[in-house]
C-alpha cells in the first residue's frame, strides 16, 4: 500500500470512533475518554523504556514515540491516543537552544525579549521534524480504529517559556513584553502561530485524526487582554488547519473566564478545567461546540468510591451537552496510581453505554 493510501485507511478506520463522533457532536455508543498526559509520567512501563534516554531525545526516536504513545491505549482502554512529544519540540527543531530538565520542564538558554531575538524564530519546515512524520506513520498503522490526537503549544504558552526562559508562576517577563511593547509582542506571537500551525499540519498530514492546542498558562490573563493580545494568534493557528476537517481542541488551565473567547478563536471542542461545572462551561462557550473535561486530577488519589462519585458529577453536569469527551481538568499527575485511571475509563464507559 502506498503511504498516502495507508494514511487514508488509518483515518477512515478511526472516523466512526466514539471520540471523533463526540468531537463532531454526533450520537455516540458511550462517552469517550482519554487523559491529558496519559502517555508517560505515571506508567512504570514508560519509566522503563525511557531509562537512560533524555526527554527531547525520546521525542526524536520514532520507535520510542510509538511505544510510549501506545502504552496507555493498551493499559487503560482509552478512546484516543495522544502523540508522545512536547510543546517545545518544534522550537528545538528550528534551532532554539533549549532542554527539558527532569523535574523542572523546558529551559531556554537565551530568553527571547528583544526584536533582534525574534530573528532566531525562523519558520518550521516539515523536513525539520521528519521523525514526527515517521512516528505518526508507524503509530496510525498500529492504532487501527483508535484515533490519534496530535498537539502543539499555543502561541501564548510557547511565548511564556521563550520569554521567561523556563517555567514561571507569574509570567512577569512575558506580561512586561505584552503590555510594554505590544508591537514586538504581536510579531512574536505571529511567528509562533506560524510555527505551531506548521507543526500541526505535519501531524495531520502524517495521519493524526484530531489536534489539540495547549494554551496551558493563558488563564493568567484577563479576558480583554486575551482578546487583544492572544486571540488573533491562536485564531490564526485554527484557521490554518481548518480545511483538513479534523476536530480542533483548545485547552487551557484556569480559563473559566476565557472559555467563550477560546471557543471564538476557532476550536471545535473546548477543554474545561475542573474549576467550573460542565453545564456552566457549556453556557459560557455557547452552542455549536463540543466540550472536553473535567475531573480534578487530584481526585484520583481519593480512592475509587470518591472517583466514581466525582466522575458521576461530571457526567451529570455534561448530560445535556451537544458533545462530551471525558477527560481530566488538567494532565495526569506523575504519582497517580495507573489502576485508578484504568478503573475510571471502565466506569465512564459502563455508566454511559447506550
Ligand atoms: O499527553 C501526553 O501524554 C503526551 C505527552 C506530552 C504532552 C501533551 C508531554 C510529554 N508534554 C506535553 C505537553 C506539554 N508540555 C504542556 C501542555 C500540557 C500541560 O499543560 O500539561 C506543557 C505546559 C509542557 C511543558 C512541559 N514539558 C512541562 C511543564 C513545565 C511547567 O511549566 O510546569 C514539563 C514538566 C515538560 C516535560 C515533559 N513533557 C512530557 C513529559 C513526559 C515530560 C516529563 C519528562 C521528563 O522529565 O522525563
Image (spheres, rainbow, N blue to C red):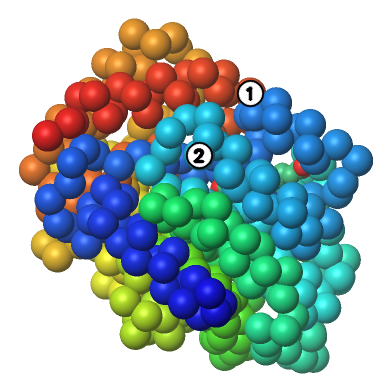
| Residue 230 or residue 299, whichever sits in front | 299
| Residue 343 in which image quadrant | top left
Name the residue rendered at 8%, 43% in the picture.
320
Q: Check disc 1 and report the residue beneath it.
A: 335
Which sits in the foreground, 14 or 341? 14
User: Which residue is at the front of the view, 247 or 174?
Assistant: 247
Q: Please, what secondary structure does the residue beneath circle 1 have?
A: loop
- Residue 71 lies in what quarter of the image? top right
Position above or below: 62 against 54? below
Q: Is mark 1 within 8 Å of ligand 1?
A: no
Q: Position of residue 181 (x, y in %)?
A: 61, 84
How many labels sit on residues? Answer: 2
Q: Residue at x 47, y 58 (%)?
A: 149
> Is residue 158 shown left or right of residue 347?
right
Whole-percent x and y of residue 82?
A: 52, 52
Residue identifier under label 2 = 73
Q: Residue at x 45, y 12 (%)?
A: 302
Q: Position of residue 6 (x, y in %)?
A: 49, 71
Q: In the rendered view of the protein, which quadrant contains the C terminus?
A: top left
Indicate whether 300 appears above or below 219: above
Mark nearer the N terminus (1 vs 2)? 2
Decide if residue 42 is on the left or right side of residue 279: right
- Identify whether 143 is placed above or below 124: above
**10 Å crowding of disc 1: few (<14), some (14-19), many (20+):** few
| Residue reaching furthest to the right | 52
Q: Secondary structure at mark 2?
A: helix
Q: Residue furthest front?
A: 1
Q: Nearer the viewer, mark 1 or mark 2?
A: 2
User: What's the CA distance linking mark 1 and mark 2?
Assistant: 19 Å
Where is residue 237? Give x, y as percent.
45, 79
Res 3 visible: yes
Mark yes or no: residue 180 visible.
Answer: no
Amino acid at each position: 500500500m502506498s503511504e498516502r493510501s495507508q494514511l487514508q485507511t488509518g483515518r477512515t478506520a478511526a472516523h466512526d470512533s466514539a471520540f471523533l463522533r463526540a468531537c463532531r457532536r454526533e450520537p455516540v455508543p458511550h462517552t469517550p475518554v482519554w487523559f491529558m498526559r496519559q502517555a508517560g509520567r505515571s506508567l512504570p512501563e514508560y519509566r522503563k523504556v525511557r531509562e537512560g534516554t533524555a526527554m527531547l531525545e525520546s521525542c526524536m526516536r520514532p520507535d520510542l514515540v510509538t511505544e510510549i504513545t501506545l502504552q496507555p491505549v493498551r493499559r487503560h482502554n482509552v478512546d484516543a491516543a495522544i502523540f508522545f512529544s512536547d510543546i517545545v519540540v518544534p522550537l528545538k527543531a528550528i534551532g532554539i537552544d533549549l532542554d527539558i530538565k527532569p523535574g523542572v520542564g523546558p529551559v531556554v538558554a537565551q530568553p527571547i525579549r528583544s526584536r533582534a531575538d525574534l530573528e532566531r524564530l525562523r519558520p518550521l519546515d516539515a523536513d525539520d521534524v521528519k521523525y514526527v512524520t515517521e512516528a505518526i506513520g508507524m503509530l496510525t498503522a498500529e492504532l487501527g480504529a483508535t484515533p490519534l490526537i496530535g498537539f502543539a503549544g499555543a502561541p501564548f504558552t510557547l511565548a511564556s517559556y521563550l520569554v521567561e526562559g523556563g517555567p514561571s508562576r507569574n509570567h512577569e517577563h512575558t506580561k512586561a513584553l505584552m503590555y510594554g511593547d505590544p508591537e514586538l509582542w504581536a510579531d512574536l506571537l505571529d511567528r509562533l502561530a506560524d510555527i505551531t500551525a506548521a507543526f500541526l499540519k505535519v501531524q495531520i498530514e502524517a495521519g493524526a485524526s484530531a489536534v489539540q492546542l495547549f494554551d496551558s498558562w493563558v488563564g493568567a490573563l484577563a479576558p480583554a487582554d486575551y482578546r487583544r493580545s492572544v486571540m488573533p494568534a491562536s485564531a490564526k493557528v485554527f484557521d490554518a488547519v481548518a480545511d483538513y476537517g479534523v476536530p480542533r481542541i483548545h485547552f487551557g488551565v484556569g480559563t473559566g473566564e476565557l472559555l467563550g473567547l477560546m471557543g471564538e478563536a476557532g476550536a471545535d471542542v473546548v477543554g474545561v478545567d475542573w474549576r467550573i461545572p460542565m453545564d456552566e462551561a457549556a453556557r459560557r462557550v455557547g452552542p455549536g461546540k463540543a466540550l472536553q473535561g473535567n475531573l480534578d486530577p487530584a481526585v484520583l488519589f481519593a480512592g475509587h468510591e470518591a472517583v466514581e462519585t466525582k466522575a458521576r458529577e461530571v457526567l451529570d453536569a455534561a448530560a445535556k451537552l451537544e458533545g462530551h469527551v471525558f477527560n481530566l481538568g488538567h494532565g495526569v499527575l506523575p504519582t497517580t496510581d495507573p489502576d485508578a485511571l484504568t478503573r475510571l475509563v471502565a466506569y465512564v464507559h459502563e455508566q454511559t453505554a447506550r
